[in-house]
Amino acid sequence: MESQKPTYDFLYSNYAWPEPGTERECPYSGIPLQLNEQRPGYNGKPWTCPKCIWYFSEEELNDPAAFKGKDCPHTLEQKAEAIGKK
């Protein structure tokens, strides 16, 4: 009986991944996003903002209306902490 090797295709997320070398900016903070490595076992979104610690998909970043008038989640936390310390 021949042993079958497992396939790991199911471990990849269904998010669209950009080409290597693609650069994007955080729609909240405007700083460069980090492109996460697409690898088995990682099911998250391809982009991370190092300031916001927020994850983004290509689909989200291609829809600028999704972020219009919204603040960075990290900034909102800082504002809430500042208000609480007064």
Image (spheres, rainbow, N blue to C red):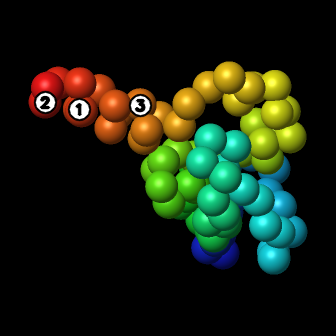
Quadrant assignment for the N terminus: bottom right
Residue at label 1? 81
Identity, as a three-letter code, of the amino acid under mark 3: Leu
Identity, as a three-letter code, of the amino acid under mark 1: Glu
Cα distance, mark 1 to mark 2? Answer: 6 Å
Locate residue 49 relative to residue 46 in the image: left or right. Answer: left
Residues at circles 1 and 2 in contact by the CB criterion of under 8 Å: yes
Which of 8 and 62 lies nearest the eye of the viewer?
A: 62
User: Closer to the camera: disc 3 or disc 2?
Assistant: 2
Which of 63 and 81 lies nearest the eye of the viewer?
A: 81
Residue 62 position (above or below residue 68):
below
Residue 64 appears at what percent x and percent y? 82, 33
Q: Residues within 10 Å of mark 1 (few under 14, many from 20)?
A: few
> Residue 85's mark?
2
Locate residue 58 relative to residue 54 in the image: left or right. Answer: right
The residue shown at (53%, 37%) is 72
Q: Secondary structure at mark 3?
A: helix
Residue 83 position (above or below residue 62):
above
Residue at label 3? 76
